[in-house]
Image (cartoon, helix red, strand yellow):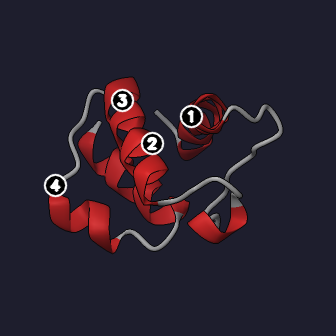
Amino acid sequence: MTREEIYKQLDEVFQDVFDDESIQVNDSTTADDIEDWDSLEHINLVVAIENRFGIKFNMNEVTSMKNVGEMVDIILERI
């Protein structure tokens, strides 16, 4: 799977979790860029991404990711 294909799927996950069809994520997207992205929604988002890609993030990864690009790097390593 390519980075571009991952972003296409992540767009769908983010749009579903945040109920906003206009969301388009990129390497530099952070919680500050998405209005409803708080700590509770972060958990929902992580679970949705794990389910979509069939992976599990460890707690260190979840707490240390600074942007969506770092999330994509981890996804690429796992799939």
Cβ atoms under marks 3 and 2 closer than 8 Å:
no
Distance from disc 4 to disc 2, alpha carbons, whole Å, reads: 14 Å
Kindly state the secondary structure of the residue where label 4 is placed. loop
User: In screen coordinates, is 77 left or right of 12?
Assistant: left
Distance from disc 3 to disc 4, alpha carbons, whole Å, reads: 14 Å
Residue plotted at (20% across, 41% down): 56
Residue plotted at (64% across, 34% down): 8
| Among the two numbered marks 3 and 2 on one chain, the one whose residue lies closer to the N terminus | 2
Q: Nearer the viewer's eye, disc 3 or disc 1?
A: 1
Distance from disc 1 to disc 2, alpha carbons, whole Å, reads: 6 Å
Q: Nearer the viewer's eye, disc 4 or disc 1?
A: 1
Note whether residue 30 is visible: no
Task: Report x, y in % for residue 31.
Answer: 58, 65
User: In screen coordinates, is 4 left or right of 59?
Assistant: right
- Name the disc covering residue 17, or none: 1
| Among the two numbered marks 4 and 2 on one chain, the one whose residue lies closer to the N terminus | 2
- Name the disc covering residue 58, or none: 4
| Among the two numbered marks 3 and 4 on one chain, the one whose residue lies closer to the N terminus | 3
Residue plotted at (45% across, 74% down): 66
Residue identified by numbered label 2: 45
Residue identified by numbered label 3: 53
Distance from disc 4 to disc 1, alpha carbons, whole Å, reads: 20 Å
Q: Nearer the viewer, residue 13 or 70?
A: 13
User: In screen coordinates, is 31 left or right of 65?
Assistant: right
Cβ atoms under marks 4 and 1 closer than 8 Å:
no
Cβ atoms under marks 1 and 2 closer than 8 Å:
yes
| Among the two numbered marks 3 and 1 on one chain, the one whose residue lies closer to the N terminus | 1
Distance from disc 3 to disc 2, alpha carbons, whole Å, reads: 12 Å
Residue plotted at (18% across, 67% down): 60
Q: Of the residues shown, which amino acid type is indicated by label 2?
A: Leu
| Among the two numbered marks 4 and 1 on one chain, the one whose residue lies closer to the N terminus | 1
Kindly state the secondary structure of the residue where label 2 is placed. helix
